Image: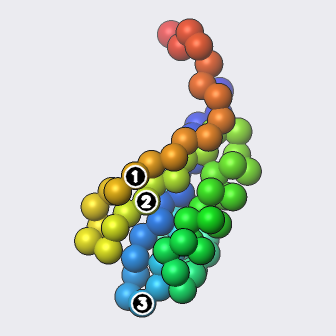
């Protein structure tokens, strides 16, 4: 089973960055939060299981989006 790939949208100085969980570097940098969110959704949807975690300027999580289908009933 594939692991869910999480893309975090975070404010960094004057720009918004998309960071894939576990990665040191940003996968993309944008002038606006809306641009960063659009690209984060594209990145998440490109994986079988994807997630976008949107952070506010204060770093707190504002919302999440998940993509892909989890098996039901769950295995295990």
Q: How far apart are labels 1 and 3 at the CA level? A: 21 Å
Q: Which residue is drawn at 57% across and 81% down?
A: 30
Earlier in the chain: of badge 2 and badge 1, it is 2
Dot in front, 1 or 3: 1
The kind of secondary structure element at disc 2 is strand
Q: How crowded is mark 3: few (under 14 residues within 10 Å), some or many (20 or more)?
A: few
Q: Where is residue 59 in the image (x, y as percent from the top left)?
A: 30, 67
Q: Name the residue under label 3.
A: 14
Q: Mark 2 points at which residue?
A: 54
The kind of secondary structure element at disc 3 is loop
Q: In which quarter of the image is the N terminus?
A: top right
In the picture, the disc for residue 49 is none
Q: Name the residue under label 1.
A: 63
Q: Looking at the picture, tell me which residue is in the foreground, 76 or 59.
A: 59
Q: Is residue 19 above or below residue 1?
A: below
Q: Is residue 31 above or below residue 43?
A: below
Q: Is residue 2 visible?
A: yes
Instruction: Report if the CB atoms under discs 2 and 1 are less than 8 Å apart.
Output: yes
* Residue 43, image quadrant: bottom right
Q: Looking at the picture, tell me which residue is in the foreground, 47 or 30.
A: 30
Earlier in the chain: of badge 1 and badge 3, it is 3
């Amino acid at each position: 089973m594939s692991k869910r790939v999480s893309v975090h949208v975070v404010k960094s100085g004057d720009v918004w960055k998309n960071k894939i969980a576990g990665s040191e570097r940003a996968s993309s940098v944008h002038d606006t939060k809306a641009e960063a969110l659009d690209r984060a959704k594209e990145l998440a949807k490109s994986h079988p299981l994807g997630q976008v975690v949107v952070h506010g300027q204060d770093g707190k999580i504002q919302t999440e989006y998940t993509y892909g289908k989890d098996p039901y009933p769950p295995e295990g």
